[in-house]
Image (cartoon, rainbow, N blue to C red):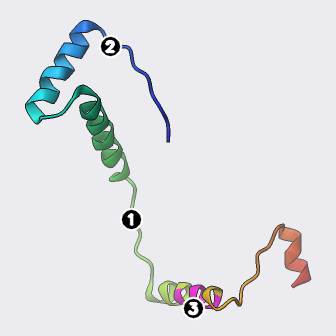
Amino acid sequence: MYKVQLTLTPEESQALQRKASRLGYGITKYIKFLISKEAIEILSDYPVIQLSKKAIATFEKAHQEHMEGKTRLLEDVDDLDKL
């Protein structure tokens, strides 16, 4: 989590406070709301790619094997030679 400190001009503070008050927010909560709204908008631009049924089945099988303890953690790509 990040902490951000802002310095606002009196005019900026007044404008934000008026808008925040109309929504029943304090200025800090309103600024957090604006940032969240922007983040959601950015994330909505990411493409969504549907997996094929075969890819889903492969994932489910691999996940099940992992849950059953049949997988190994590789610390380095050279560990592949040891398998």
Q: What is the span of residues highlighted in magenta in the rendered image?
A: 60-65
Q: Is residue 64 magenta?
A: yes
Q: First in sequence: mark 3 or mark 2? A: 2
Location of residue 25 in the rendering, given as x and y in whole percent from the top left corner: 18, 33
The residue depicted at 44 percent of the width and 78 percent of the height is 51
Question: Label 1 vs label 2: CA separation?
Answer: 38 Å
Q: Are marks 3 and 2 in contact (CB under 8 Å)?
A: no
Is residue 67 depicted above or below 1 in this figure?
below
Q: Looking at the rendered structure, which numbered label has been put on residue 3?
A: none
Q: Which residue is mark 3?
A: 61
For this view, does 68 lie left or right of residue 17?
right
Is residue 57 depicted above or below 51 in this figure?
below
The residue depicted at 64 percent of the width and 92 percent of the height is 68
Q: Which residue is mark 2?
A: 8
Which quadrant, please, contains the C terminus?
A: bottom right
Residue 12 occupies quadrant = top left
